[in-house]
Image: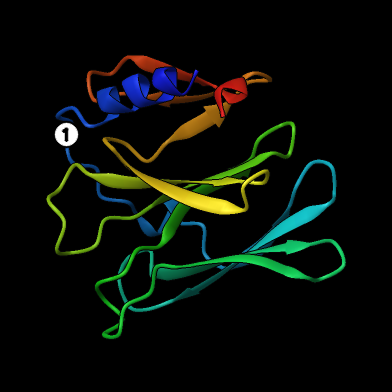
């Protein structure tokens, strides 16, 4: 099943029209609790770019820190900021898209997936920052404008 993820993610790397996130499309700072209430993601925004730069921390409900993903830079301009963030319906995955830093070619975004089972964040290149969940899949738009469905059970 992991082959399905890899094959589907290759579609995301296709050419796409550059999309500059506007301030209204950026997540900012806040905390998002998983649907089952067992985990929460705290996003802290800093920096001077359009979406700022983000630090994403995953906590257990009792406050125990599980994971940190830091997308900030030393100059406050070269990092990545969270655009969209959502827990999967089964609370097993936290997915978020990140803005483009100035040193990355336009049309490329980062999609990050936190897997609860492995307590790790994996990042992938994406053509667009938008995504959504159904009960059984992560859905995103590939570089060709087609919807790509990545089954959650594949993880």
For the rendered model, the colour scheme is rainbow
**Label 1 residue SS:** loop
x then y, percent, for residue 64: 78, 70
Against 110, residue 8 (above or below) is above
Hey, which quadrant is residue 135 in on the image?
top right
In the picture of the structure, the residue carrying the numbered disc 1 is 17
Residue at 51 percent of width and 57 percent of height: 27
Residue at 84% of width from left, 61% of height from top? Answer: 61
Q: Is residue 94 left or right of residue 19?
A: right
**Picture coordinates of residue 137, whole percent (x, y):** 58, 21
The residue closer to the viewer here, 72 or 115, is 115
Say which residue appears at 39% left-offset and 16% top-offset.
147
80 displayed left or right of 106: right
Task: Tell me: 69 left or right of 52.
Answer: right
Quadrant that contains the C terminus: top right
Q: Which image quadrant is residue 94 in?
A: top right
The x and y percentages for residue 1 are 50, 17
Q: Nearer the viewer, residue 82 or 26?
A: 82
For residue 51, which quarter of the picture? Answer: bottom left
């Amino acid at each position: 099943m992991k082959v399905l993820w890899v094959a589907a993610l290759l579609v995301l790397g296709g050419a796409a029209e550059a999309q500059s996130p506007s301030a209204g499309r950026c997540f900012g700072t806040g905390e998002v609790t998983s649907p089952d209430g067992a985990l929460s993601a705290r996003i802290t925004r800093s920096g001077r770019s359009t979406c700022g730069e983000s630090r994403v921390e995953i906590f257990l409900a009792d406050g125990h820190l599980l994971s940190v993903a830091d997308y900030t830079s030393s100059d406050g301009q070269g990092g990545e900021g969270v655009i969209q963030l959502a827990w999967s319906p089964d609370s097993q995955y936290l997915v978020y898209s990140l803005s483009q830093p100035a040193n990355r070619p336009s049309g490329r975004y980062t999609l990050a997936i936190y897997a609860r089972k492995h307590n790790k964040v994996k990042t992938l290149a994406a053509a667009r920052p938008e995504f959504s969940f159904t009960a059984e899949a992560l859905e995103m738009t590939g570089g060709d404008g087609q919807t790509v469905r990545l089954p959650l059970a594949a993880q």
